[in-house]
Image (cartoon, rainbow, N blue to C red):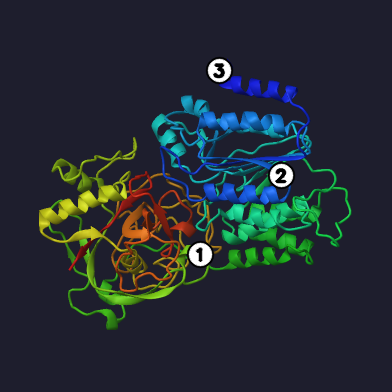
Amino acid sequence: MKLKFGWLVAVLLMIIAQPAAAARVALVIGNATYQHTSRLANPGNDAADVSTALRSAGFAVDVVTDAGKSRMEQALSAFAGKAAGSEMAVLFYAGHGMELNGQNYLIPVDAKLESEAVAALQTVRLNDVMDIVGASRLGIVFLDACRDNPLVNNMTRRSGTRSAFRGLARIEPIDNLQVVYAARDGSRAADGTGRNSPFTTALLQGLKTPGLEIRDLWGEVRTEVLRMTNRQQEPFVYGPPLSGRFYFTPPSPGMAAAPAQAISLDPELLAFQAARRAGSEATWRQFVQSYPNSAYAATANIELAALARPRPQPQPPQAQPSVQQALPRAVLPTAAAGTNAMDCPECPEMVKIPGGSFRMGDLSGKGFPHEKPVRGVQVSSFWVGKYEVTFDEWDACYAAGGCSKRPDDERGWGRGRRPVINVSWEDTQQYVQWLSRKTGKRYRLLSEAEWEYVARGGTSTEFSFGDCIHNDRANYDGNYHFLGCGRTGVYLEKTQPVGSYAANPWGLHDVHGNVWEWVQDCWEAGYAGGPTDGSALTSGDCSQRVLRGGSWFYQPIIVRSASRNGGPPKAGDITVGFRLAKSD
C-alpha cells in the first residue's frame, strides 16, 4: 500500500512547500498510442487543441501525450505544486478510462490490465487527480475518457470478473471542484471521426466563446454533443453549484456580463431531466402539460413523436429473397446471379453478386462526416462470403501451414462457427493467399465500395432491413437506440455463431454487427476523390485500413450500412474479423 500511494504522499508534501501559484494553470493529457490495444484516433489532437484554447484563455499549460504510468505520475506530481492555491486549476484528459469496483481509473498507454488484481497498480486513480486539482480555489477536471475500451473487455474475460466497466462511475466532488464527463456515468463516449472527439469539439467551441459563463458553457457542450451523436452521448457535470460567475474567455470589450445570480434548483429543468431518465410517453406528456412554454418543449415533443412511431414487429423466419428478386432487373446481367458455391470442403460458402450501380455513403444525413460525400459507384460482378470467416475455416489454414497465427477465441466464447477474431489486416492476407493457392481461384478482401454494395443489398435505408434495428436482427449493444426506434436492453457482450440472424436481401448474414470486417482499402476521412468503379483505394494513409459493419460491442449508429472505421493493419482485436471476396 505504501508503494502504491507513495507518489501521492510526495505530491502532498510538494503542495505544502510550494510558493505562490500562478493565477490559472492547466495540465492536458492525451493518451492515444496504447501499446496493448488499438490506437485511438483523436486524443493527441484533442490535447493539442485544448491546450491552445486554454493558453489563449490565459492559462499556463503543461501538455503530456502518450504517457505511461510513470510519466503520468510525474506530470501530476509537477502539476500539484502549480495547482495548490491557484485561482483556477484545470485538468483535461483524453484517452481510455474505466470503473473497477466503484472506483474510477485513467489508463496509461503501457497498461496491460491482465487481471483485476493488477489493474489498480497499472492505472491512475481519478480520486488522486481530484485531490490535486481540488487544491486550487476552483478546480475543473474534464474527462473525455469513457471510450470503448477493449483492454477492459479483455481483463473481464480473462479474470472472469464482472466488476470492470468501460464507462466511469458516478462521483460526488465536494467544495470547489467540478468534474465533467464526456458521457454520463455508466455510459460510453465516442472517439469521433473528425479531428476531435464530439465532446472536445463542443468544448473547444465553448472555451473560445467570449462571455460564455461556465454554467452556460456546460449547457452548450451538452446540447452540441447530443446533436452530434444523435442523442447517443450525454455529457454530465458532477460537483456542487459554483458561487459567483466564471468565464474561460471573458466578455469582449463592450459586451456586458450578466449579473451574478443566486444558484437555485430549477423545477422545470428537474422535471425535464426526470422525464428524460424515465423515457416513457406518459412522463414526456406530463412534462409538456406542466410546462407548455418551456425551452425544452420542442425536445419533449420530438421524444413523444418518436415514442408514438410504430415499431417494427419481429417476424417469423421467412425464406430470403434471391439476389434476382431483390435487384432491379436492369442490373442482373446473367442467370447465374444469386448462385451459391464452395470451392472445397473447408472453403467459405460464396454467393454470386451481379454487377450494378448504387449510391454510397450517408444517404440520410444522420451519420458522420467521414461517410460523405455521397457518390454513385459502379460495381462489377463478383463473389462474396455468405458469412464472416469462421474459426473452423481459419484453423484449416493454420493446420495446413498457410496461416502463421492461431488467434485466441476469448476464453469461454468458443471457436467452430463463430467468426474468427483477433486477426489483423496483415493476417487476413495470409489467409486469402493460402486459399487462392489451394483452389486456383482469386480470393481477396472486398473493396470498401463492394462491401457497402452487398451490405445494402439493393436498399437505401439505414440498415439492409429498414431504418430501425432490433436485437432479433443483429448482434450489437441494444442499450442504445437510433432514430427513436427504442432500446431493447439486449447486450450479449460477445460474438455469435455466423448465421444466427436472418440474411439480408442478397442472402448475406451478419453485415450489421457481430464483428467489424476488414476490407482492402486504405483509410481516408471521406469519399472525395475516391474511386467510383468499385475498386479499392490503395493509396493515401495506408497506416490505417478500413473496417466496415460494426460489431457486437457497438451501438446501432455504428452498425449502419454506411458506417465505417479504420484500424492499424498490424492490430487484431476481439471485435474484428473479416469476410471474403472472390473475383470472377
Q: Earlier in the sequence, mark 3 or mark 1?
A: 3
Which one is in front, 563 or 510?
Answer: 563
The percent coordinates of residue 148 (x first, y second) are: 49, 46
Determine the secondary structure under disc 1. Answer: helix
Q: Is residue 79 left or right of residue 373?
A: right
Mark 2 vs 3: CB contact within 8 A: no
Quadrant for residue 208, please give it: bottom right
- Residue 3 is marked as 3
- Sort mark 1 into few (<14), some (14-19) or many (20+) by Cα contacts within 10 Å: some
Q: Is residue 415 left or right of residue 11?
A: left
Q: Earlier in the sequence, mark 1 or mark 2?
A: 2
The percent coordinates of residue 498 (x first, y second) are: 30, 52
Quadrant for residue 26, please give it: top right
Mark 3 vs 1: CB contact within 8 A: no
Residue on which disc 2 sits? 59
Q: Against 475, is 321 above or below?
A: below
Q: Against 557, is 576 above or below?
A: above
